Image: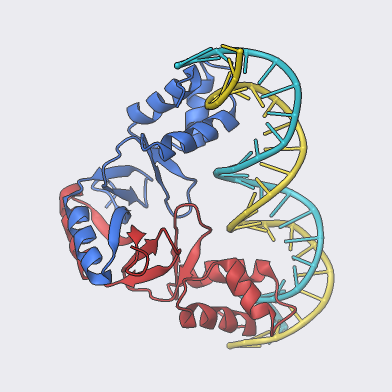
Chain colours: A blue, B red, C cyan, D yellow
Amino acid sequence: MKFSKQRQLILNAVLQSESHPTAEIIYDTLKKDNPSLSLGTVYRNLSQLESNGLIRKVKIIDHPDRYDGIVSDHAHFVCRECGKVIDIGNLEVIKLQEKVAEEIDGIVEDATVILYGRCNQCK
Amino acid sequence: MKFSKQRQLILNAVLQSESHPTAEIIYDTLKKDNPSLSLGTVYRNLSQLESNGLIRKVKIIDHPDRYDGIVSDHAHFVCRECGKVIDIGNLEVIKLQEKVAEEIDGIVEDATVILYGRCNQCK
DNA sequence: ATAGGTGCAAAGTCTTTGCGCTTAA
DNA sequence: TTAAGCGCAAAGACTTTGCACCTAT
């Protein structure tokens, strides 16, 4: 994989962000200092970076896809009130994967876990 | 909520299906015996039924949204080889929710859990 | 009677892609 | 040098919605 200036910018934006940004957010953020950047490039790179395992896509019901720089399996908590997304440790997720692999007699490669509710500020 | 003929058909289609159908699949299936049915109606009803807690939406990476008649929290396993979706018991999911509620000091209302891998036939 | 639902088709949102130019390796 | 990437704009996939008509309650 080549590392163009744009790809570096996009990768860094995801890795440095703590807000699990959407393609649009990344585009808007980077556009300020890189006015020629195109949205298509952002999508192409997010997709490419994900294929190469450098970032991870997170699907949240009723929101556009988000991206996350933490690649090891872990869960997300989404606050229904304020929309905040919080990373959750992966210990429980790994346990879950093991149980399920046993239950279906198959191989569990990874998991997407999203919990919905109210965060400590909004509850 | 009123129960039109269409709503009944759509609800039954989701409840009876074992394949976690998409809106398109439901539409194609019901269209055979109900040629005047429109895709917009299917989307409207799936959305409405979900709001009322009768069915549940399942988001799977790189697939259109699917719907599921089992409303209690539970996980899904998706086979990357054959695309099959298998329901997983909810015991582990409930445990996970409890741990996370504690970890974030918030309220966890429900969860979407999707595991990816190879099923017993494809592994 | 009437709030809510329907079919249809147009519009909206998010994402992908074809093309001719540019650039990292 | 050249395979890969870029910007742009058009197209695509999926979903929502406005409107005039219809129906469950």
Q: Nearer the viewer, residue C5 or B121?
A: B121
Q: In this view of the protein, can residue B90 be seen by the observer?
A: no
The answer to whether residue B29 of the structure is visible from this angle is yes
Q: Nearer the viewer, residue A92 or B102?
A: A92
Q: How many marks?
A: 0
Q: Position of residue B6 (x, y in %)?
A: 63, 80
Residue A9 lies, with reference to residue B103, above or below; the image says: above
The quadrant the N terminus of chain A occupies is top left
Q: Residue at image x 65%, y 73%?
A: B28
- Tell me which residue sits at (40%, 36%) in the image: A52
Q: Give percent across and percent down for residue B106.
A: 22, 52
Residue A77 horizontal side relative to residue D20, left or right: left
Give how far across and how far down residue B12 sits, in percent: 52, 83
Q: Give me the residue at 54% from left, 21% from top.
A: A31
Q: Quadrant of residue A53?
A: top left
Residue A63 x %, y %: 47, 49
The correct choice, above or below, for A9 with respect to D25 in the image is above
The residue drawn where x is 33% and y is 43% is: A85
- Left or right relative to D3: residue A61: left
Q: Kindly indicate the quadrant of the structure image that contains residue D2.
A: top right
